[in-house]
Amino acid sequence: MSKLFCYERVEPHNKSVALIVDDGESIRSLIAEMLADAGFEVLEFQTAEAALASAPSANPTLVLTDLRLGKNRMTGAELLREIALILPGTQGILMSAAFDPDLMPSYRFPLLAKPFSRTELLSLISPPAA
C-alpha cells in the first residue's frame, strides 16, 4: 500500500494542461491516462530539461514529476523550482519510489509515494476547468 504525503491540494487554473516528467515510459503512460481521463491535456517528458524547455509555451496548470530523473540530470524538485520562477501559478507534485519523508519540508512540494493509485493521485488535484 502506498503512502500519500501532501502539504496542499493542487488547484488547476486557466486551461488545464498537465506535464508529466518521468524517465520511465510505462509510468508516464499510466499517469498520462489517469490525468487525461480526469480531463487534463497531457504532455509527457522523459527529462526535466525537455519539460522545462516546453513549459513556457505549454503554460501548464500542473507538473507531476519524478524526484530522481537519472544520473547527471536535473531533479524533479529543481524542475519545479525553475517552473515556479517562470510560471508562478503552476502547481507541482513530486513522486518517488524511494525518498526520505524527513526531507519533505526541503522539497516545498507535495510528494506522492510510488506506487500510487488513481484515487491517491486525483485526491491531490481538483478537476480541470471546463
Image (cartoon, grey):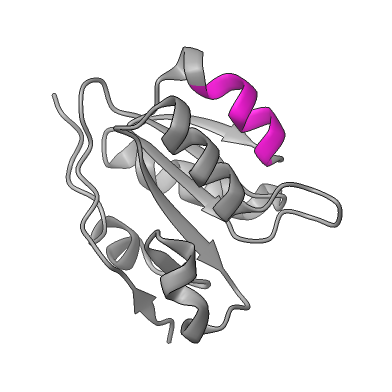
Q: Is residue 123 magenta?
A: no
**Left or right: 72, with 5 as reference point:** right
Camera-nearest residue between 59 and 85: 85
- Is the N terminus in the top left, top right, bottom left or bottom right quadrant? bottom left
Is 88 located above or below residue 68 in the figure?
above
Which residue is at a point 51% across and 73% down the rendered structure image? 115
Looking at the picture, how far across and down is residue 58, in whole percent?
46, 18
Residue 53 located within the stretch drawn in magenta: yes
Residue at the extreme left: 130
Residue 14: x and y, percent? 21, 22
The x and y percentages for residue 52 are 60, 29
Q: Is 43 situated above or below 64?
A: above
Query: How many labels, in total?
Result: 0
Q: Residue at x 34, y 35 (%)?
A: 90
Which residue lies most toward the top here?
57
Name the magenta segment's main secondary structure: helix
In the rendered structure, which segment of residues is drawn in magenta? Answer: 48-55
Q: Nearer the viewer, residue 41 or 78?
A: 78
Please state if 6 lies on the left or on the right of 105 as rendered: left
Image height of 12 relative to 58, above or below: below
Residue that appears at 54% across and 50% down: 65
Q: Image quadrant of residue 69?
A: bottom right
Compared across the picture, whether 106 is left or right of 49 comes to left
